[in-house]
Amino acid sequence: MLVKQRTISSAATLSGVGLHTGNKSNMTFKPAPPNYGVRFKRIDLENSPEIPADIDHVTDISRGTTIAKDGVDVHTVEHVLAAITGCEIDNIIVELDTNEPPVMDGSAKDYVRTLIHAGIVEQDEDRDYLVIEDTVHYHDEKGNVDIVALPLKNDFRITVMIDFQNPALGSQHSGLFNLQEEFAKEFAPARTFCFLKEVEMLIQNNLIKGGRIDNAVVIVDREFTDSEFKEYKKKIRLDDKVKLGTTGILNDTPLRFKNEPARHKLLDLLGDIALIGAPIKGQILAARPGHRSNVEFTKILRKLYLQKKAVKKYQMLKSSNGVLDIEDIMKILPHRYPFLLIDRILEIDKEANKITGLKNVSFNEPFFQGHFPIKPIMPGVLIVEAMAQCGGVLLMHAMEDSHKKMAFFTSMDNVKFKKQVVPGDQLIFEMEITTYRRGFCKMKGKAYKSYVGGELAAEGEFSIVVVDRPV
């Protein structure tokens, strides 16, 4: 698999109409720097707002996948994301002058052709993969959907099975085993499909305004007489020349592949799991997937990815000696035994006003004698105090006369305790100053149990006042 990140070498544009909105749409792919990711950019709006293509920004899955940020949205992004993923591109800007990419012929073929024409280039930074090390299983009882991620050493594969119990479709399956060799020719051309009975519902819901008989495969799933079909065509605004056909597909549209619907479902799934924000090393097996199940499964994988990323970060920090040891901390903070609750500062980012600290939780902590003898648990109030001390180091570290100052809580908000902290744990604190003015400071932070995958132990927002130390 690829080692280095990739982007495109030049800008490239394609135009058409949005499938659901019917809006005229010009879409331009542009190069992006390493670690930028995939972002959609609405150049038709003031300040050209960007929306990161990750699961945290998914707002609607009623028909396709919609992402949004601060009230700005982009609809039906899955085919574009599938093309970007299939071409193994990590960093790219997708500029749009409306709120939906052009549907083209209902597949990802034209997107892939445009990306290849733009040229794909390697970048200096390494790719950050989500490595599947244990089985991940999603099951939807109501929809009879199962999606599984399995470990697969240094490779990526994806297999999809569909079963709509329709004579024109039957039960189908398809598998992609090599992105570089198979995606562009075997999966990108697979078009979106729907059932004829769905068309009326979609129109009633103000969707498929840009839908045409040549940008979707429409499966006939009910019987009509000639006169009934003629009236039905008027009702759903079909061209009078469109015929019912004899193959079970409206207008007898020929399929590009015998199992084209299954291939398109694989394409959709590939686009939706791109919202993890990282490529996968593993194998995906999906039975009867749809956008709703894809998104729920992707949420699980995104959480796993962020946990693994946190572990890597903390392991990197732990492998260093940090920037401040306990003696340095004691020069900054007035706290002493038994109330000095941080052992080391691992990182200080002055520009971002952020700090990372560490506490080793030992069984010898005095508070464990009473909290509780039969089940030692670190009091939540002390976790919060340790977070505040870590933030206090950041606050005081920037002051020239910090030895003359002290910091006190004035309030705490949105404090939540997620996991119990017990002897043997190691706490990692991440604190950030959000505002500081005339001695009044607001900060927010999180405490992680690093040894179990960066699990969140506590979080909160704090208001602090800085005063002079008593002489």
Image (spheres, rainbow, N blue to C red):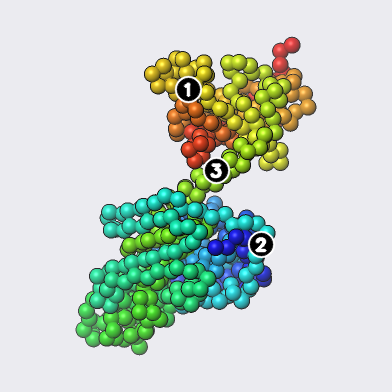
Query: Disc number at residue 123?
Result: 2
The answer to whether 358 appears left or right of 243 in the picture is right
Residue at left 33%, top 57%?
146
Q: CA distance from mark 3 to mark 2?
A: 24 Å
> First in sequence: mark 1 or mark 2?
2
Residue 447 in the image: state x and y as whole percent: 54, 33
Q: What is the three-letter code of the residue carrying label 3?
A: Ala
Query: Which residue in the rendered view is the most extreme toward the bottom?
Result: 241
Dot 3 or dot 2: first in sequence order is 2
Upstream in sequence: badge 1 or badge 3: 3
Q: Position of residue 171 (x, y in %)?
A: 28, 71
Q: Secondary structure at mark 2?
A: strand
Q: Splitting the image into 4 quarters, where does residue 96 fall?
A: bottom right
Residue position marked by numbered label 1 in the rendering: 379
Helix, strand or loop at mark 1: loop
The front one of 320 and 416 is 320
The residue under label 3 is: 310
